[in-house]
Image (cartoon, rainbow, N blue to C red):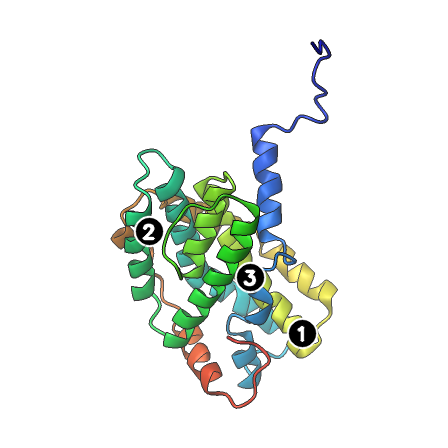
Amino acid sequence: MNDEAPDPHRTAQPSQHRLATLLVLVDGRLPAGGHAHSGGVEAAVTDGSLTGVADLDLFLLGRLHTAGVVAAAFAAATTHALNGPGADGPARLDELDAELDARTPSPAQRTASRAQGRTLLRAGRAAWPVPPGPRAPHHPLALGMVAAGGGLRPADAALAAAHLTVTGPATAAIRLLGLDPLAVTAVLARTAREVAEVARLGADAASWSPRALPAPAGIRLDLLAERHRLADLRMFAS
């Protein structure tokens, strides 16, 4: 019998464990395929509307408050459907997937979202016991599924979705324009408060019915996605 008291420095509290899991989930080195997608940045660079750090700052804010709100809400709702109070599981996921499809008018964006969702699920299932769901879900649903498998809460899934909405495109801008990574990091730091606010909005909507979830339109993002799909020369898949 071991009568030694547990070492508090080696015993992670539940909140610490969740934070550590969340850090793994949003780490850019996770092989989830995000490096292959620019989130509209490549098309914006091509049409000349994004040429530097100042343009990127505005682009990321616009993306965060449209696509980011939707992603945060659907990721949180997915996690809630799988491990929240009265969770109703896979049946609700099909409804969420259909509603997110309806909020994604661009065929190119729908294709990119499902491609990223499949890749994220492969990575997530290698690390955590991800619950079953749609075979090729939209990326926010896949994020919510993986978050549920990792023992995260809807608010964690919403924060991950909001964070990834801006970090992926920011990295793409560095690669496309050769921007100073330190300057881009400063842009991301300035958006942190708004990322947190969008995540809060998403978490607040986690228990809503799928039809009632937010649906802010990002028309420019839709147009950029379709232009990118028709481009002869592309570095990114979307």
Judging depth in this view, the residue of 158 and 130 nearest the camera is 130
**Quick one: 189 or 35, which is closer to the camera?**
35
Q: Which residue is mark 3?
A: 166
- Locate residue 37: give its quadrant: bottom right
Q: Residue at x 52, y 48 (%)?
A: 196
Q: Nearer the viewer, mark 2 or mark 3?
A: 2
Q: Nearer the viewer, mark 3 or mark 1?
A: 1
Q: Quadrant of residue 5?
A: top right
Query: From this viewpoint, is residue 194 visible?
Result: no
Percent of width and height locating residue 208:
30, 45
| Residues tagged 2 and 3 counted as in contact (Cβ below 8 A) | no
Q: Between tags 2 and 1, which lies in front?
A: 2
| Residue 111 appears in the rendering | yes
The residue indicated by pointer 1 is 175
Residue depicted at 33% across the width and 58% down the height: 97
Q: Could you tell me the amino acid type at mark 3?
A: Val
The answer to whether 56 appears left or right of 208 in the picture is right
Could you tell me residue 129's position as x and y percent?
49, 43
Q: Residues within 10 Å of mark 1 (few under 14, many from 20)?
A: some
Classify mark 1: helix, strand or loop: helix
Amino acid marked by disc 2: Leu
Looking at this view, is 133 or 169 the one in front?
133
Q: Earlier in the sequence, mark 3 or mark 1?
A: 3
Q: Residue furthest front?
A: 1
Question: Contact, CB < 8 Å: mark 3 with mark 1?
Answer: no
Residue matched to label 2: 93
